[in-house]
Image (cartoon, grey):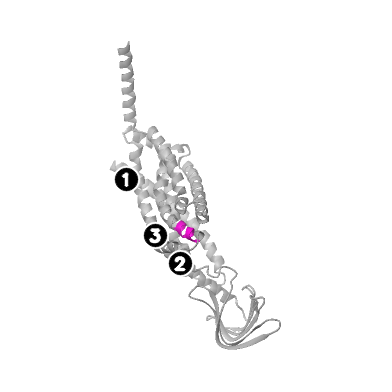
């Protein structure tokens, strides 16, 4: 049995690594495209790109580890069944449930790794990623400002600059028309200025040595200033990079849920808490489902397992999105909503496990049982006759 366990564990582990690599590559390529769009004009270096991808890795791993366990187990058992290795194990007296031992070993280890990432690492990576992107956004606006050109990427605002120092981003001879307040527009002039990012991740124009003209159609007033800070409206959420649910630790989520004043806000924190627990636990559930299901798709071998795995991934993802939406809206209790995928997959796993146990018991035990039953039937007929 030690030899068999090592063989099965080795087969599943190799496929687990391959599936994890493929899934991570797909998500990473999508994130690279997002980063490229967000950092246009920021001159991002290879090292900075690498750090950004490193920050996103925990979130990707928490999502892909359960899916990799599912695919690896499904493909392995599909191949074992297609090559008649399951029949050989039955002939040697090895039950299907005994074969599950190396599967559960891998699934448990993967689940514990995913749980550690989910509770202790994921929120740190999310915050570092969003903070870095905020810095690139402010650099992009600085890079986009050109000399003797009108810059109008901030809604309701036009900026004109006489000179721009290369490298430092300092601006000289600044003129700003701020029409964000339609009833009270402002004209601002400054000797110099610079776009930067505030501690709360807002984009701020810091001006020095200038004049501010404000008023309406009837009255105007002039203010001379030494230093002036102007928060720029980027057209999106001004606090997009301040800590949200995904950037909070599990303890912070619990505290925020307790302090939340309204149900939708509280539900958002509770949903995120349960999501971080449910995804790692899915490693075990999906492994228990994939093993017996792999025996049912043996005709297609490994390819059949891949097709069934992709279908299960889609179903699991849709259930996850459905539960998250229902939980945030309060249509389902947040705790129950985020465990819906595990409950559905767990019920399917129980059905297929019972069925597989009946069909793939040890062949020697089945032959003995059939022979014993036949002898009992003959003895009963003889005595009855």
Residue 268 belongs to magenta span? yes
SS at mark 2 in the image: helix
> Residue 281's spot in the image, x, y percent?
40, 51
Q: What residue is disc 1 on?
A: 6
Mark closer to the chain start, 3 or 1? 1
Q: Which percent across, then down, holds residue 178?
A: 63, 78
Q: Position of residue 155 (x, y in %)?
A: 63, 72
Can I make out residue 18 in this image? no
Question: Is residue 118 visible from the viewing direction of this image?
Answer: yes
Classify mark 1: helix, strand or loop: helix
- Of mark 1 and mark 2, the one earlier in the sequence is 1
Residue displayed at 36% across by 37% down: 96
In-image side of 234 versus 356 (left or right): right
Write down the region rendered in magenta.
Answer: 265-272
Residue at the farthest right position: 217
Front: mark 1 or 2: 2
Contact? badges 3 and 2 (CB < 8 Å): no
The Cα atoms of the two marked residues, 1 and 2, are separated by: 40 Å
Q: Which residue is mark 3?
A: 119
Most extreme residue toward the top is 385
Determine the residue positioned at 50% across, 47% down.
Answer: 315
Left or right, 2 with reference to 340: left
Residue annotated with mark 2: 127
Residue neighbourhood size for the residue with mark 3, other residues' Cα within 10 Å, grouped as few (<14), some (14–19), many (≥20): some
- Residue 208, magenta (yes or no): no
Q: In which quadrant is the C terminus drawn?
A: top left
Q: Secondary structure at mark 3?
A: helix
Question: In the picture shown, does residue 242 fall above or below 215?
Answer: above
The picture places residue 99, in percent across and down from the top left corner, at: 34, 40
Q: Earlier in the sequence, mark 3 or mark 2?
A: 3
Using a 10 Å C-alpha cutoff, classify the residue at mark 2 as few (fewer than 14 neighbours), some (14 to 19) or many (20 or more): many
């Amino acid at each position: 049995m030690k030899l068999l366990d090592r063989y099965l564990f080795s087969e599943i582990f190799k496929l687990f690594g391959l599936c994890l690599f493929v899934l991570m590559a797909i998500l990473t390529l999508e994130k690279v495209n997002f980063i490229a769009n967000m950092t246009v004009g920021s001159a991002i270096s290879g090292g900075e790109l690498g750090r950004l991808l490193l920050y996103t890795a925990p979130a990707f791993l928490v999502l892909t580890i359960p899916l990799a366990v599912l695919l690896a187990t499904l493909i392995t058992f599909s191949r074992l069944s297609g090559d008649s290795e399951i029949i050989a194990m039955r002939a040697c007296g090895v039950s299907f449930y005994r074969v599950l031992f190396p599967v559960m070993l891998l699934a448990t280890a993967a689940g514990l790794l995913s749980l550690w990432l989910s509770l202790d690492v994921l929120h740190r990576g999310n915050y570092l990623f969003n903070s870095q992107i905020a810095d690139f956004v402010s650099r992009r606006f600085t890079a986009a400002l050109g000399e003797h050109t009108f810059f109008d990427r901030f809604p309701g605002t036009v900026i004109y600059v006489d000179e721009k120092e290369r490298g430092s981003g300092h601006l000289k001879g600044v003129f700003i028309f701020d029409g964000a307040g339609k009833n009270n527009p402002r004209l601002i002039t400054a000797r110099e200025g610079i776009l930067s990012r505030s501690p709360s991740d807002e984009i701020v124009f810091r001006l020095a040595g200038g004049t501010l003209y404000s008023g309406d159609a009837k009255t105007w007033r002039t203010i001379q200033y030494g230093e002036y800070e102007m928060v720029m409206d980027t057209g999106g959420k001004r606090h997009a990079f301040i800590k949200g649910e995904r950037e909070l630790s599990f303890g912070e989520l619990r505290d925020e849920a307790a302090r939340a004043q309204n149900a939708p806000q509280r539900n958002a924190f509770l949903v995120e808490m349960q999501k971080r627990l449910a995804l790692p636990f899915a490693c075990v559930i999906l492994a228990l489902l994939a093993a017996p299901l792999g025996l049912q798709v043996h005709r297609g071998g490994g390819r059949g397992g891949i097709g069934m795995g992709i279908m299960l991934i889609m179903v699991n993802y849709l259930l996850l999105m459905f539960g998250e939406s229902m939980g945030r809206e309060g249509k389902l209790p947040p705790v129950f909503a985020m465990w819906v995928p595990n409950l559905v997959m767990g019920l399917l796993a129980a059905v297929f496990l019972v069925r597989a146990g009946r069909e793939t018991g040890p062949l020697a035990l089945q032959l003995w049982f059939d022979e014993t039953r036949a002898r009992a039937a003959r003895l009963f007929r003889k005595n009855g006759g």
